[in-house]
Amino acid sequence: MFRGVVTDVFFDLDHTLWDFEKNSALTFKRIFAKNGIDVSLESFLEMYVPLNLAYWKLYREEKVTKEELRYQRLKKAFDAIEFPTNKPLIDKLSEEYILHLSSFNHIFPDTKEVLEYLMPNYRLHIITNGFEEVQHKKLQNAGIMHHFDVIVNSEMAGVKKPNPKIFELALEKTGASAEKSLMVGDSLEADIFGAQAVGFHTLHFNPTQDLNHDFCKIITRLNEIKTVL
């Protein structure tokens, strides 16, 4: 499908290669135990996961700051399960969450196999909305940093996906052309629509199979990339 057309493959990181939900749950388990937070982790995550996604959407849209995202997603999750907190506790947990998150290194099945498969024939890169101080540690600890030539994050670009400027910066830094570039990501809005607006080819990674659309090809496992590249 893209063989002979694509020279550069750009990946999103969280929820695409790096298993954010699994690593995030392990991080909360660690910091709750460390701080004596006696709550059901399952009940907390049931509230936190959708709140986190909602706040990341607001963050992409420049409606909240990084600080507001980090604080409010925790505060509202604890409020939802009626666990009493205060600002110093939330601030402490927020800092420890970021500190410990990248120490967990679960990646999606087939990640390393697919990257090894692609490396001989394509240049591989990352475009991420994640925070700069965390993303490099995630890649290093997961043992996949060496696969990527260029890593572009939203703090470096000054904007977040789906803003075209972050994709244009990625093209500038890599020397790639949009018509020979493929974006692989889990977010229809941020990764697929954002990249398409700049002229990239796109591949939607949707492991939960919760979306069906005709905007581009959908894969549910990363090793399906081998069928198109």
Image: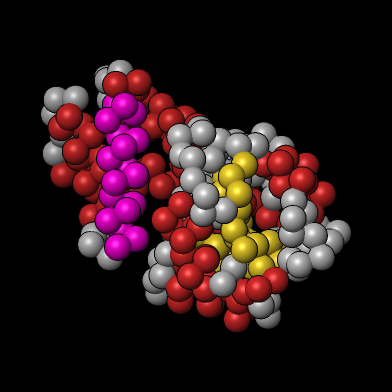
Residue name at image x 33 percent, y 52 percent? 56
Q: Quarter of the image containing the C terminus?
A: bottom right
Image position of 55 with respect to 107: above or below: below
Quarter assignment of residue 76: top left
Q: Position of residue 160 (x, y in %)?
A: 40, 66
Quarter assignment of residue 145: bottom right
Residue name at image x 77 percent, y 45 percent? 227
Q: Is residue 143 visible?
A: yes
Q: Is residue 125 visible?
A: no
Q: Position of residue 113 (x, y in %)?
A: 78, 42
Image position of 56 with respect to 164: above or below: above
Q: Position of residue 156 (x, y in %)?
A: 47, 72
Quarter assignment of residue 108: top right
Please give the range of residues in magenta: 44-61
Residue name at image x 27 percent, y 30 percent? 47
Q: In the rendered view, does 214 fall on the left or right side of 80?
A: right
Residue name at image x 51 percent, y 54 percent? 215
Q: Which is nearer the eye, 192 or 146?
A: 192
Q: In the rendered view, does 87 fall on the left or right side of 155?
A: left
Image position of 202 with respect to 116: above or below: below
Residue farthest toward the front in the current orientation of the protein = 214
Q: Quarter of the image containing the N terminus?
A: bottom right
Q: Position of residue 104 (x, y in %)?
A: 55, 37
Q: Is residue 155 magenta?
A: no
